[in-house]
Image: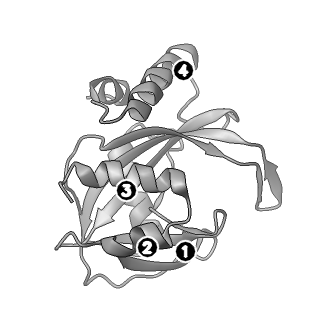
Amino acid sequence: MNWIEQIKNYRPTSVEEKKDRELILNYIEKHDDLLVRDNLLMHFTSSALVLNETRDATLMVFHNQFQAWSWPGGHVDADPDFLSVALREVREETGAKNLRPIFEQIASLRMLAIEGHWKKGAYVPAHLHLSVGYLVEGSSKDELRHKEDENKAVRWIPLRELDRLCREEHMKVVYRHMLQKLDL
């Protein structure tokens, strides 16, 4: 199934996701460059909420740009296989090797506002990430390492501590909605 069909088939679990999905589908009809960062207004990203084997902790990175604990992920950069992108980003950002999707289908679809910022000496204006998220299981036995140009640290965060450690209120909502799909 192609990426547009996956988004069309996604069943939102919140009012926010329903509206975001509607807008994303509308933008897909009007723009042919949403898979690349050349579209400075909005473009797709793919991320994963990685849970350990006992599903009581999630693998998070301390993101340099946001200065907050966050799920691993990144820009799709023209790759329409969003799940593959999410898994690749987790591996690159955390060193985790043993990953498997809990579901092959999209588990979250949101529009996330990104403030203007400096990256590698260039200014990146404010824009939207059309964020596709997946639920993934990882191994707590994997040796972890951080990716210095993107994050300062990587660790398994117990789910009971996620609300306290995650400073981005809008992301707490995303994580909660995803975890509800697993009855956690």
From the viewer's perspective, is 132 left or right of 137? right
Q: Is residue 74 above or below residue 9?
A: below
**Identity of the residue drawn at 35% across and 59% down:** 49
- Closest to the camera, between mark 2 and mark 4, is 4
- Image quadrant occupied by the N terminus: top left
Inspect the image, locate mark 3, and give the three-letter code of the amino acid beneath it.
Ala
On the rendered structure, is 160 left or right of 124?
left
Of labels 3 and 1, earlier in sequence is 3
| Residue that carries the numbered disc 2 in the rendered image | 94
Q: Which residue corresponds to the image point at 54% horizontal and 44% vertical from the top-left? A: 77
Query: Could you tell me which secondary element the residue under label 2 belongs to?
Result: helix
- Asked if labels 2 and 1 touch by Cβ distance under 8 angstroms, the answer is yes
Q: Locate residue 119, reporting x and y percent.
A: 75, 59
* Residue neighbourhood size for the residue with mark 2, other residues' Cα within 10 Å, grouped as few (<14), some (14–19), many (≥20): many
At 27% from the left and 59% from the top, the residue drawn is: 136
Kind of residue indicated by mark 2 = Thr
Circle 3 sits in a helix, a strand or a loop, which is it?
strand
At a point 36% along the width and 43% down the height, the residue shown is 108
Using the numbered discs, state the Cα–Cα distance from disc 1 to disc 2 in whole angstroms: 7 Å
The residue wearing badge 4 is: 27
Image position, residue 157 (x, y; %): 37, 76
Q: Residues within 10 Å of mark 1 (few under 14, many from 20)?
A: some
User: How far from the left and from the top, in percent, is residue 51?
Assistant: 27, 67
Above or below residue 137? Residue 154 is: below
Q: Is residue 152 left or right of residue 83?
A: right
Sequence-first tag of 1 and 2: 2
Which one is earlier in the sequence, the residue at label 1 or at label 4?
4
Q: Nearer the viewer, mark 3 or mark 2?
A: 3
User: Could you tell whether 139 is left or right of 27 in the image?
Assistant: left
Q: Which residue in the protein does label 3 denote?
A: 48
Disc 3 to disc 2, C-alpha distance: 12 Å
